Amino acid sequence: MQISDEVKKILENESRSVVLATADKSGAVNIAMFGSMQVVDDSNMLMMLGDNRTYANVSVNHSAACIVTIGGTSGMGVQGCRLYLKVNETADDGEEFESVKAKLKEKIGDAAEMLKHLVKFEIVEARPILDMGQGI
């Protein structure tokens, strides 16, 4: 799917919060907040992950969902979107891995050393946070 300009604007907002939900092969759910999400193009995004439960889950179950909200909004006025995702590929090294990690290191310093996996997601569906049929 190709995301709308409205969704792209939400994903590129500097004050956004990203919460990613994943499940393991038996269906046990995990949810976590991440700051490493980046838009690749109109239908793909990526994240850098450490050796954590989220990475273990996406390694065996390629489906995930995330909520992206814009800071400073709350309640019924919250701005953001819901994304339904499918893992396209993962990488633990290579030129793109190093480039993405270097950009994150500029923002978070040595904390970037815990990032071991580049995960690319296809955006399968985008929906509003509060879906009343208005689309996004």
Image (cartoon, rainbow, N blue to C red):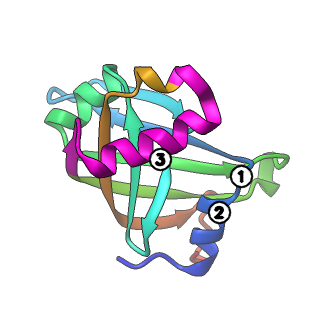
Lower sequence index among marks 3 and 1: 1
> The residue tagged with tag 1: helix, strand or loop?
loop
Q: Which mark is residue 37?
A: none
Tell me the amino acid under the disc marked 3.
Answer: Cys
Taking the spot 59% from the left edge, 79% from the top edge, the residue there is 5
- Magenta stretch contains residue 127: no
- Residue 42, placed above or below residue 55: below
Residue denoted by label 3 = 66
User: Could you say where residue 63 lies in the image, as x and y percent from the top left?
Assistant: 26, 47
Dot in front, 3 or 1? 1
- Residue 126, placed above or below residue 62: below
| Magenta segment boundaries in residue numbering | 89-111
Dot in front, 3 or 2? 2
Lower sequence index among marks 3 and 2: 2
Q: CA distance from mark 2 to mark 1?
A: 9 Å
Taking the spot 53% from the left edge, 79% from the top edge, the residue there is 4
The image quadrant of residue 7 is bottom right
Residue denoted by label 2 = 10
Q: Are marks 3 and 1 in contact (CB under 8 Å)?
A: no
- Residue 100, placed above or below residue 105: below
Q: CA distance from mark 3 to mark 2?
A: 13 Å
Judge by depth and name the residue closer to the eye, 44 or 129: 44
User: Could you say where residue 24 lies in the image, as x and y percent from the top left?
Assistant: 22, 28
